[in-house]
């Protein structure tokens, strides 16, 4: 029993020593711990907040004036189109497309990231025998697309902050 506890503590120590971070985590400087999202849809905003989780020091400001980091999202657009039809005329496969542009500014309105484009596409097969399951599959795929979009923004912020060090 003692060896198990020692093994767990040793493993935790090694992981923290090697610089391991949870996927999607980003370390922001103290002055940038408050983020304001401007122009994002509810889904993107919600996923952005989920990506930081409850264990981080990052907060989300109500106004741009109270934020250390401002993310401006514009031209946000999502689309769903039919890729193929069955012999009976029903849709066999779909393509989901999600894209937007974004800028990132600091509290003094200095541009950190300018006019970056995020464009994500996914395809899925529409099984006519499992219509309800496919509706759920589409929701899961859209959620993954929002997670990927947030990851793209966070990577852009990380690169910009590393350049400004």
Image (cartoon, rainbow, N blue to C red):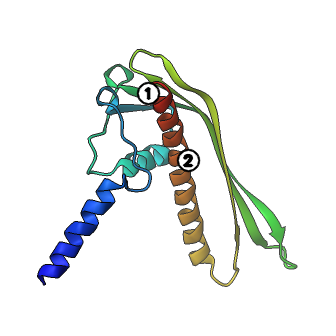
> On the rendered structure, is 98 left or right of 92?
left
Q: CA distance from mark 1 to mark 2?
A: 16 Å
* Classed neighbour count for the residue bearing mark 2: other residues with Cα under 10 Å, few (<14), some (14–19), many (≥20): many
Image point 36% across, 52% down: which residue? 19
Considering the image in quadrants, where does the N terminus appear?
bottom left
Confirm whether residue 76 shows in the render.
Answer: no
> On the rendered structure, is 50 left or right of 162?
left
Please identify the quarter of the rendering in which residue 22 is found: bottom left
Element under disc 1 = strand
> On the rendered structure, is 103 left or right of 66?
right
Label at residue 93: none
Label at residue 149: 2
Q: As displayed, is residue 132 above or below residue 156?
A: below
> On the rendered structure, is 72 left or right of 126?
left
Asked if the residue under mark 2 is in contact with the one under mark 1, i.e. CB atoms within 8 Å, the reply is no
Of labels 1 and 2, earlier in sequence is 1
**Residue identified by numbered label 1:** 70
The picture places residue 63, in percent across and down from the top left corner, at 35, 25
Image point 22% across, 74% down: which residue? 7
Please identify the quarter of the rendering in which residue 31 is found: top left
Camera-nearest residue between 50 and 33: 33
Camera-nearest residue between 160 and 143: 160
Element under disc 2 = helix
Residue extending farthest right: 87
The picture places residue 132, in percent across and down from the top left corner, at 57, 76
């Amino acid at each position: 029993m003692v060896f198990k506890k020692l093994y767990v503590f040793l493993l935790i120590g090694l992981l923290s020593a090697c610089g391991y971070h949870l996927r999607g985590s980003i370390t922001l400087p103290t002055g940038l711990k408050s983020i304001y999202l401007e122009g994002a849809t509810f889904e993107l905003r919600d996923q952005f907040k989920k990506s930081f989780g409850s264990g981080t020091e990052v907060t989300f400001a109500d106004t741009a004036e109270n934020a250390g980091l401002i993310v401006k999202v514009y031209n946000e657009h999502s689309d769903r189109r039919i890729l193929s039809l069955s012999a009976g005329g029903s849709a066999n496969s779909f393509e989901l497309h999600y894209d937007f542009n974004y800028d990132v500014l600091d509290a003094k309105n200095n541009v950190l990231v300018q006019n970056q484009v995020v464009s994500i596409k996914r395809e899925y097969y529409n099984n006519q025998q499992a219509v309800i399951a496919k509706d759920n599959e589409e929701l899961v795929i859209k959620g993954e697309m929002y997670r990927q979009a947030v990851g793209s923004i966070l990577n852009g912020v990380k690169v910009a902050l590393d350049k400004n060090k």
